[in-house]
Image: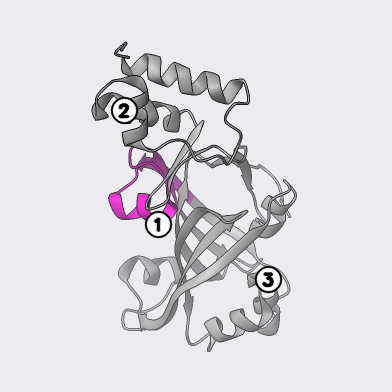
Amino acid sequence: MTTHTWTSIRDALASDIAQGRLQPGDKIPTEPELVERYGTGRHSVRRAISDLAKQGKLSVEQGRGTFVGSQPMLHYSIGKRTRLRRNLTAQGVDISRDLLASEVVEAPVRVCEALRLTMGDMVSHTRRIISANDIPIAFGSAFHSVDRFSGFADRRAVFGSVTETYRSYGIEDYIRAETNLHSRQARPDEAKMLRQHPDLSVTIIRAVDALPDGTPISFSEVVWAASRVKFSIEGGDHD
């Protein structure tokens, strides 16, 4: 039996994908099956899969298996008026945002600074996971002043979108006042939440939304799967 190197395993799987023998969404053989097929060790198989995952050709989903990449990279434009659903659904994907947790807490220092609150003020803290075609692409937190937005999480559940929820408070328009982003390797819990390979990166975005007059109304911190979403910064308004 021929013993294959990790690069030959990688190239063989890449060829199967390119030739259509493995289709988008297909689950590839398990690690033991690949070890037996290629007459090699687990380390070589893992390295081959890791390299293909970094290229976006495979998606390693914790607890489910490894699949052929099933969707193209999404593009998210960040501008003065950034709206997630409008941004991504135009690319032909079904966007869902599921609530993970909701609580009223004392505002952390960074939230007080962003929302111009006083230490000790209370905020609504909600955590959600965002998926595109049922594949997680991001998760994170949003904070709103309880004094300004009493019962925000409950209203958000009723109205179904942030924009419509703001309208219920008499806010017809809001803008992106500040966006800060950086990338780093995913932490183990983040990789598990996003169902991605642990060696892949994430993009961290911290943002402040405000009224047109500049009054801040929300602070958010979201972890995005960098292999699934690419960002661009727009110079003008973006609806």
Q: In the image, which disc is placed on residue 163?
A: 3
Q: Is residue 144 left or right of residue 170?
A: left
Instruction: Please state which of residues 166 and 3 is positioned toward the viewer in this rendering.
Output: 3
Task: Give the residue pinned by disc 1.
Answer: 193
Could you tell me residue 68's position as x and y percent?
53, 36
| Quarter location, residue 29 | top left
Image marks 3 and 2: residues in contact by CB distance under 8 Å: no
Q: Which residues are magenta?
A: 180-204
Is there any visible trace of residue 68 in the rendered image? yes
Q: Amino acid at mark 2?
A: Val
**SS label for mark 3:** helix
Residue that appears at 29% across and 13% down: 3
Gap in Å between the C-alphas at discs 3 and 1? 26 Å
Q: Is residue 50 above or below residue 101?
A: above
Which amino acid type is shown beneath numbered disc 3? Thr
Looking at the rendered structure, the secondary structure element under dot 2 is: helix
Q: Earlier in the sequence, mark 1 or mark 2?
A: 2
In this rendered view, identify the residue nearer to me: 112 or 166: 166
Q: Looking at the rendering, in which quadrant would you find the N terminus?
A: top left
Q: Which residue is mark 2?
A: 35
Mark 3 vs mark 2: give the one in front.
2
Res 105 quadrant in image: bottom left
